[in-house]
Image (spheres, rainbow, N blue to C red):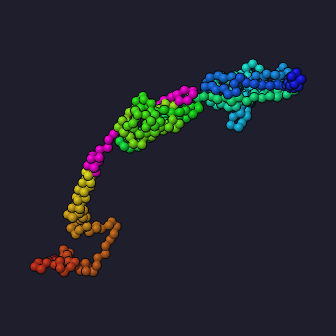
Amino acid sequence: MALRRRPALALLLLLRGCLIGAVNLKSSNRNPVVQEFESVELSCIITDSQTNDPRIEWKKIQDEQTTYVFFDNKIQGDLAGRAELLGKTSLKIWNVTRTDSALYRCEVVARHDRKEIDEIVIELTVQVKPVPPVCRVPRAVPVGKAATLTCQEGEGYPRPHYSWYRNDVPLPTDSRANPRFRNSSFLFSPDTGTLVFSAIHKEDSGQYYCIASNDAGSARCEEQDMEVYDLNIGGIIGGVLVVLTVLALITVGICCAYRRGYFINNKHNGESYKNPGKPDGVNYIRTDEEVRQPRGCSVPSREDDIPLRTTQVCRRDF
């Protein structure tokens, strides 16, 4: 048994000798999660190194782009003024924002070690509390009609889930799953925030509001009233009949007016016709017949215009 242990012990001693003088890193938390505007520590710890003053670098990897965070012994980029090196290698960030969510790589270069370079990657997740969502609720819906209520929020991270309330009572995802809502017919999606009624009932009237929530917190929209009313079929038919009756009376009145001649134009009949006056600046030339005609006598334009029993006496002036 002792002979069998000797080769294994020799192998362990050989491996230990090879690792001596090699820089190695570890982290107490490779996936830190923090809420927006809080502080966070990105842990990077040197476990083995023979170099007293190794070179430390932090880099940020976001959207396939790599930028320096700590380089040449100072904070770089958008973390300047709100981050510092903690201990020898760890990085602390104050007042984190949603744009700080990224991969951070800690790199250590130890010139005096057999393995001079080691690195470790840390993924930082910044959670963002939702803002009040935008809710759309129809104000009035007739009985038996379909209706859709929507709830949308675009700031929270991770993406929030939604819940709808009616008169402060939470609604299930399916009305058929809860006997309390057996008189309703709706489906609700917590992922999209859409509440769909296939056929509205009178019991669906009430005050509706939506809550958007994630791990960072929650927010709700203002209550909105939805009224469900009955359709007055008799009133609708009566209104249509009244309109048709009025249109028929107007048509009959117009026809009667046309028949009695109220729309005939009498402006150009013989009684109202007037000869045009003599334009200014125009001199008329008298014909020979007009010259021979004595003054005070009128020449009839047609023979039919001469009276049968009257005689026109003309006096010639000398």
Q: Position of residue 201 (x, y in %)?
A: 36, 39
Report the residue that reaches farthest toward the front. Answer: 1
The residue depicted at 39 percent of the width and 42 percent of the height is: 199
Q: State which quadrant residue 17 falls in.
A: top right
Q: State which quadrant residue 197 falls in.
A: top left
How many marks the image carries: the answer is 0
Q: Is residue 14 visible?
A: no
- Start-end of magenta stretch: 213-240
Q: Position of residue 216 (x, y in %)?
A: 57, 27
Q: Position of residue 301 (x, y in %)?
A: 22, 77
Does residue 222 belong to the magenta stretch? Answer: yes
Quarter the N terminus occupies: top right
Looking at the image, residue 249 sits to the left or right of residue 77; the answer is: left
Seen in the picture, residue 300 relative to 240 is either above or below; the reply is: below
The residue depicted at 61 percent of the width and 25 percent of the height is: 35
Q: Nearer the viewer, residue 14 or 3?
A: 3
Seen in the picture, residue 291 relative to 29 is either above or below; the reply is: below
The residue depicted at 33 percent of the width and 39 percent of the height is: 229
Q: Position of residue 15 (x, y in %)?
A: 86, 26
